[in-house]
Image (tube, grey):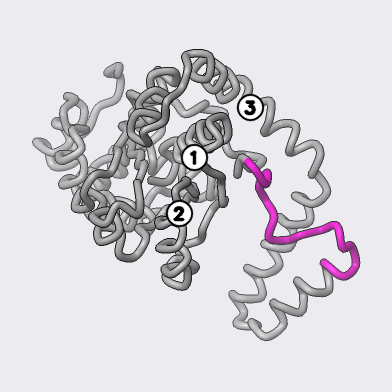
């Protein structure tokens, strides 16, 4: 699930495979690539080592491959109200309804994930509070024999402080490229808004030809998949929705995603129950 520690989870698995020598990382796979990579996934599954990827969509035929022992899935999920806050901030949107499309997809995927046998699910609010235990649980799921030194090493390497330092370093070392990417994305949005799609590829080619070092598709650190604003100033805080969302926004989310909130055991606090019982009336001030 997006904005639920999926990159941290990916890096913990990547670190485990690197330290045990039992696999390698293949980076992030975009949703549009998944159908074309089906044969590749099967080939990887038949090799006696792990290939770890990160994706925010379900791989086609996941259940079939899981039953055949060709795939293992590590999944993380979060309070959808906090996901809404995080996405709204990340995408620089003015209101939470602008990310409902993303939330629709991610909650649908949650229920589809539950149908796949043998997946390993981690509840964001629990596992990020105890990274060493999260590492042990991941290693156990992947049948990896690890030492406590590996557990401590990985937990320290991917602590919030160390991760923020890594992000800051990446941002400084790639400041010009990231600046160009922001300007390029803004220009492309304007062109597409005016339905001038024919020159989009030409603009990309021209920019990259002027400076071969600029890669408009590379916005993340190659190994870790971290990007410049990956962790917001909220530091992945819990229950931020209670102070950041307006009453009508909370009501809209609860109404739209009630089935997810109930199934994932998030619909238990008094604040949220009040929203449902009063059909939209909500009061701030209760602590999490």
Magenta run includes residue 221: yes
Q: Provide the residue designation for mark 3.
A: 164
Mark nearer the N terminus (1 vs 2)? 1
Q: Which mark is residue 271?
A: none
Task: Return the residue found at the far left.
Answer: 277
Decide: few, some or many residues near mark 2? Use Cα within 10 Å; few <14, some 14-19, many ≥20: few
Cα distance, mark 3 to mark 2?
35 Å
Cα distance, mark 1 to mark 2?
20 Å
Q: Which mark is residue 47?
A: 2
SS at circle 3: helix
Circles 3 and 1: CB distance less than 8 Å? no
Q: Provide the residue designation for mark 1.
A: 10
Please provide percent x and percent y for residue 212.
87, 63
Give me the residue at 39% from left, 48% from top. 96
Magenta run includes residue 81: no
Give me the residue at 83% from left, 68% from top. 207
Please provide percent x and percent y for residue 116.
23, 52
| Foreground disc of the pair 3, 2 | 2
| Foreground disc of the pair 1, 2 | 2
Q: Is residue 191 left or right of residue 6?
A: right
Depth check, front residue: 287 or 70: 70
Cα distance, mark 3 to mark 1?
16 Å
| Foreground disc of the pair 3, 1 | 1
Magenta range is: 208-223
SS at circle 2: loop
Decide: few, some or many residues near mark 3? Use Cα within 10 Å; few <14, some 14-19, many ≥20: some
Q: Is residue 2 left or right of residue 228?
A: left
SS at circle 1: helix
């Amino acid at each position: 699930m997006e904005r639920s520690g999926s990159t941290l989870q990916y890096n913990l698995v990547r670190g485990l495979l690197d330290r045990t020598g039992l696999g390698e990382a293949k980076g992030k796979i975009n949703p549009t690539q998944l159908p074309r990579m089906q044969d590749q996934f099967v080939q990887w599954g038949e090799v006696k080592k792990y290939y770890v990827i990160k994706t925010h969509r379900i791989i086609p035929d996941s259940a079939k491959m899981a039953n055949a022992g060709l795939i293992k899935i590590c999944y993380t999920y979060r309070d959808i109200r906090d996901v809404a806050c995080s996405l709204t901030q990340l995408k620089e949107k003015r209101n939470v309804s602008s990310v409902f499309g993303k939330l629709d997809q991610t909650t649908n995927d949650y229920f589809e994930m539950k149908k796949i046998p043998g997946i390993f699910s981690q509840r964001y609010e629990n596992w990020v509070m105890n990274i060493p235990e999260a590492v042990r649980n991941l290693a156990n799921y992947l049948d990896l024999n690890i030492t406590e030194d590996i557990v401590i090493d990985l937990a320290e390497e991917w602590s919030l402080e160390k991760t923020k330092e890594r992000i800051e370093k990446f941002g400084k070392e790639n400041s010009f490229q990231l600046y160009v990417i922001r300007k390029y994305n803004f220009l492309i949005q304007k062109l597409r808004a005016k339905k001038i799609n024919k020159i989009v590829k030409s603009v990309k080619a021209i920019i990259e030809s002027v400076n071969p070092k600029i890669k408009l598709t590379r916005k993340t650190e190659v190994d870790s998949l971290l990007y410049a604003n990956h962790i917001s100033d909220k530091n992945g805080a819990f229950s931020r929705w209670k102070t950041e969302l307006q009453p009508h926004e909370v009501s809209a989310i609860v109404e739209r995603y009630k089935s997810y909130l109930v199934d994932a055991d998030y619909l238990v606090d008094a604040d949220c129950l009040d929203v449902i019982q009063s059909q939209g009336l909500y009061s701030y001030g209760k602590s999490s």
